[in-house]
Image: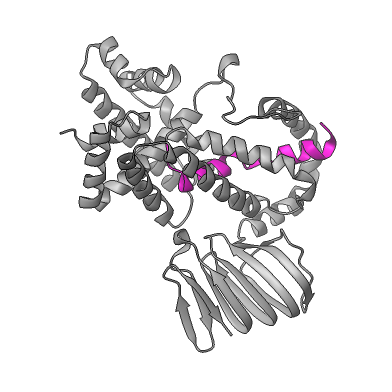
Amino acid sequence: MNLAETHAAQVFLSHHDFVKGVALKYAPWPGLMDDITQQVFLEFMAKESKWDLSNDARPLLATMTRHIAMRLWRERTRQQPEVVQKLADHIRLLAEEREKPPRYEDKISVLRSCLQKLPEKSRELVELYYYNEIGTPEIAEQINMKADTVCRALSRVREKLRECIQQSMNQGGHAHA
Amino acid sequence: MLDSDTLIQHYLEGTLSDAEAEQLHALLKAQPELGERLIQHFEMDAMLRATKPLAANNIIRPALLPKRRFTFATVTSVAALAACITLLGTWIVLPWLKSDVEETTASVAVLTRGVNLEWESAPITPGTPLSPGLLKWKSGIAQIEFYQGARILIEGPAELQLVSSGEATCTRGKLSANVPPQAKGFRINTPKGTIVDLGTELALM
């Protein structure tokens, strides 16, 4: 990799979370955000010689991400049953109606400190589902609970974390989950 | 009949059945506030996945065919090393860098194309992010894409005041705009009044 490519990669990496935030806005489908981010990176690097990287790259990355997100969205949802497609399109419209992309890059760093403040059982649930990638039916079996109960517990954990992030960003200080 | 939390979780896991999809869709239409909750859960779910500790067998798995000279993982490590070296030089120019960052974080649009543009102000090259302010050119055509998604073409002589990512004021020039659904509500102010897009193309002369 030459110097120009390295510089381009650095620029992209510095806006990695920003790209994810835009991807979330335009393609709210499970697992699609990472695919979109990957593809944006590949296409950004493929044309790195064309970009003027001396200025803010975010408008360019936002435009690229939006186009790629919509393309991958179409490809992914086309494979789904019609009833799921309709639901997905409804959710996508809801996400797009929000004025700005989520402040992903600001929130992600706060999230890590909020995770440390979770009660032990909640942390274990996060580890099982998000880090060990065990599905809710399997978790339910493992901890002897109903699957619906696990779903609701995960929902509560996410809400607590969201409140913690919000509190932390509003106050700029300590927050409790 | 499942509760909304369970339905949302099934959506996030990608395990929604057709019946559950229909149920969730009906709930979203009946309870608009549920939509906002779902999006919030979706964002939090994505962020939680991103906090997963990296392991050798868990580094990003490309979903598309990356037949390239480099992979994201390789570039990450090389770029990180380069970043450390770059930082040594960066701190010296930090005051200037900071002012550049503050200025560019206010950008609301980008000049995507220019044809025979003859600027009255300092020349701007395609790809340049644009902050709120006045653009003036004597001749030529500029294509500007707003951060909100709207795209306008203006033929000079033209004067365009960028107000925000969803609003501009055009006091001179021939303008046409393409406003996709996600940019609904885009506003163009003119001497003769304000046009608010409702999801179509529009033109001003």
For image coordinates 52% across by 80% down, the residue present is: B189
For image coordinates 43% across by 53% down, the residue present is: A96
Report how many numbered discs are placed on residues in the image.
0
Residue B157 is covered by the magenta coloring: no
Is any atom of residue A106 visible in this view? no
For image coordinates 35% across by 38% down, the residue present is: B41
Quarter of the picture holding the N terminus of chain B: top left
Residue B24, quarter of picture: top left
Residue A120, quarter of picture: top left
Q: Which residues are magenta?
A: A1-29
Rendering colour mode = one colour
Residue A15 is covered by the magenta coloring: yes
Q: Position of residue B97 (x, y in %)?
A: 74, 51
Q: Position of residue A169 (x, y in %)?
A: 45, 44
The secondary structure making up most of the magenta span is helix
Q: Tell me if B151 is positioned left or right of A1 in this view.
A: left
Is any atom of residue B112 visible in this view? yes
Task: Judge whether B53 appears above or below A9 on screen.
Answer: above
Q: Tell me if B17 is positioned left or right of A57 in this view.
A: left
For image coordinates 31% across by 18% down, the residue present is: A121
Q: Position of residue A31 (x, y in %)?
A: 46, 32
Q: Tell me if B114 is positioned left or right of A117 in this view.
A: right
Q: Tell me if A37 is positioned left or right of A141 in this view.
A: right
Quarter of the picture holding the C terminus of chain B: bottom right
Q: Position of residue A161 (x, y in %)?
A: 37, 34
| Camera-nearest residue between A172 and B204 | B204
Task: Judge whether B119 appears above or below B108 on screen.
Answer: below
